[in-house]
Image (tube, grey):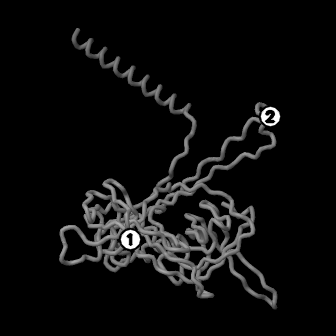
Amino acid sequence: MRIKSSRLIAWWFFVTGAVAVLAIAAVASNEEPSNIELESGIYYSVKKGDTLWEISNRYFNTHWRWPQIWSENQQIMNPHLIFPGERLRLFHQIWDAPLAPEPDQSQIPSLVDQPVMESRYFVYSSIHRIGFVKEQPVEASGRITLIKGDKNVQKTILGQDESIYVTSAGNTPLKVGDVYAVYRSPVPVKDPESKDPVGVQYYKTGLIRIAESRQDYAVAKVEKAFRSIMVNDVLLPYEPVSSKIQLIPGKSGIDGKIFMAEEGSVVFGNDVVAFINKGSEDGIQTGQTYAIYDEYSIEFVLDTVDFGSLLVLHTEATTATVLILRSDRSIQPPGKFRSPSSSQNL
């Protein structure tokens, strides 16, 4: 009798378990499809003689993805110094929300003459580390002075998780828990052709959080080190931004210059962050895309050809920070960009 009872109990668990699995599967099958982020990648162990430049070319068929590899591996403080045995994540992520469903016009007469808007996105996971060019310098909230526990020798390079001393600028209080973005002291930028001043570059190096507040200084913790954080770097209020950038059409009639790459490269291409000489005052908005083009003359006739595209990541009044999405040839400042035709908009 005991054997029969145990068999009945086992059979009961099997039947109820199968029913539960089928029920879960049925519910899952009836769920509406949701927007998801597609994420894929592999890991690579650095060998002797490797460089990010060559690793990028080996895995992505272009040298110009090395900044993306660097941005996705925050343990690398200097992109020119990688060591055998280091484990690199080779990662690419693009997320595209499906189009909004077409409304039933017979059921909603008021929408008959209204267009159905697309909802498309580009995910740029390094959005939090980009800098900008501003027409005039802004007042800093503070400045990095020393690494904690080292009052006699000023260390010039600080890494992630280190504690540092910071001083406030003017009457700006540095409150415990506040997060600040860290930038190099702003550097003047000129137009590569006319040599006229364009503004000042703010080059982001990391994020810090205020841990202690004293009378004359504060102690902060390095939350993120995007590049080497240095003594005398300045602090600005941190404003979080989403890595999901909604794509919108570029403004018509725009014609401008790509006047420099963020890292100062004299020649650059795909996936490089750069700056353009148009901003919010010109109608430039985050999420817009524009065509990169060149001009050439044939028998005294000037013609143009598009060979790439860029995406606006951040805007200031007279400039904007952009990502080179595609470039079929090398760009050497000043590059040219313009409003794309409707068929070229992403």
Q: Name the secondary structure under disc 2.
A: helix
- Residue to which mark 1 is pinned: 234
| Quadrant of image for the C terminus | bottom right
Rendering quarter of residue 211: bottom left
Q: Residue at x 78, y 88 (%)?
A: 298
- In the drawing, does residue 327 fall left or right of residue 64? right
Camera-side residue: 60 or 132? 132
Camera-side residue: 128 or 331? 128
Q: Name the secondary structure under disc 1.
A: strand
Q: Residue at x 78, y 85 (%)?
A: 302
Where does residue 238 sit, x and y in percent of width and height? 43, 60
Where does residue 345 sit, x and y in percent of width and height? 69, 62
- In the drawing, does residue 27 fall left or right of residue 85? right
Mark 1, residues whose alpha carbon is within 10 Å: few (<14), some, or many (≥20)?
many
Q: Residue furthest front?
A: 171
Q: Are marks 2 and 1 in contact (CB under 8 Å)?
A: no
First reached walking from the N terminus: tag 2 or tag 1: 2
- Residue to which mark 2 is pinned: 109
Where does residue 266 sit, x and y in percent of width and height? 52, 84
Q: Which one is closest to the eye, mark 2 or mark 1? A: 1
* Dot label at residue 205: none
Work out how far the residue at label 2 is from the one at label 1, CA to CA, in angstroms.
57 Å
| Quadrant of image for the N terminus | top left
Q: Residue furthest top?
A: 1
Say what amino acid the circle numbered 2 marks. Answer: Pro
Say what amino acid the circle numbered 1 marks. Answer: Val
